Image (cartoon, grey):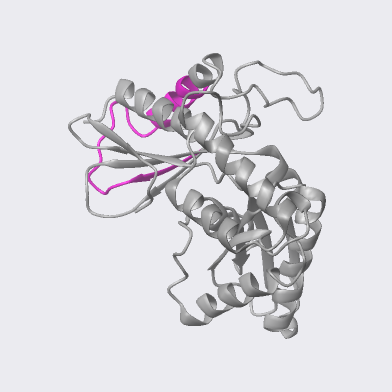
Amino acid sequence: MITRKTLEEAMYAAMRTASLEMPPDVRAALERALAEEPEEMARQHLEISLRNADLAHQGEGLVCADTGFPLYFVKAGSRTVIEGGYGTLWQAEATATARATQDCYLRPTMVDPLRRSNPGNNLGPGMPKLELQFAGDNDGLEIIAVPKGGGSEIFGTFYRMLFPSDGVTGIKKFVLECIMNSCYAGKICPPALIGVGLGGTADLCMSLAKKAALLRPIGRHNPDPMIADLEAELLAASRELGLGPMGSRGINAVLAVNIDTALTHTAALPVAFNAQCLVGRRWTALIASDNTYTLTGEIA
């Protein structure tokens, strides 16, 4: 049985590490971008970002000061048993988030949308956000902690209901417009990880886009060859826009384009766009049934 104490410790450790470390696949992608970027100012932005990640790793501060929205994505096995039931997950995430905020690994950025009052601990209606899904015949838990930066969410979230007749051409046009709008002036802190959702209802489409941006390792493509080809085409097209890191001139405004799909209504073609900023923060805690856990920057 996985105890509440273990959940709290693992969630805290994952969120703390996510705020301090750049995932290895993201760092490798930034290094590749630096090696091929032709524009001097763009290269300087990339060099500074990598240097900043080094300083954070050495204990000199957060990998980015805007820790944004505290998000947790949890996968449980069919035989996973949690002390107090699955509701304990939401209790544990609140404790872990408040502790991470108190210890200055999260900035207290969550406020009431109308009153603008700030509880000071990132706790309140809907926050922190936890999404639970069941996957696989096992007795463990996978918890991915994501401090989702404000800029990438505020300026990098779009949705449009296309006509089915718009087809792939309409999808490409929409996605490239979103890249232009969000990367202009460095609003989402590019080079960005782009998630695209196709199909489903409006809320499902948006969720597909967000998880594609946040949770898929760079270089892992959609298993559907048609979708994988579209990912590659959009990434190549993004390099022709003249946009580089942090809104500068260049070719590397985008590190990856990840697309996920769902069935949708015969009269609909919903498309959603969600961006993650260049630090790509996410860290994983893997909890075993014996109450031990390990942390990793890799995603299975």
Q: Residue at x 27, y 33 (%)?
A: 293
Question: Total of numbered circles in the picture?
Answer: 0
Q: In this view, does 265 lie to the left or right of 77?
A: right
Residue 218 at what x, y percent from top left?
48, 59
> Is residue 157 among what the camera can see?
no
Give percent across and percent down for residue 106.
57, 25
Give the residue at x 63% y 28%: 125
Q: Which residue lies furthest to the left in this view?
A: 290
Of residues 47 and 255, the one nearer the viewer is 47
Work out whether residue 15 can be spotted.
yes
Location of residue 99 with respect to 256 vertically, above or below: above
As drawn, 111 above or below 188 = above
Give the residue displayed 41% in from the left and 32% down from the top.
Answer: 14
Point out the stretch of residues depicted in magenta: 72-97
**In which quadrant will I find the C terminus?**
bottom left
Residue 76 magenta-highlighted: yes
**In percent of the image, x 61 and y 31: which residue is there?**
67
The quadrant of the image that shows the N terminus is: top left
Classify residue 89 by image quadrant: top left
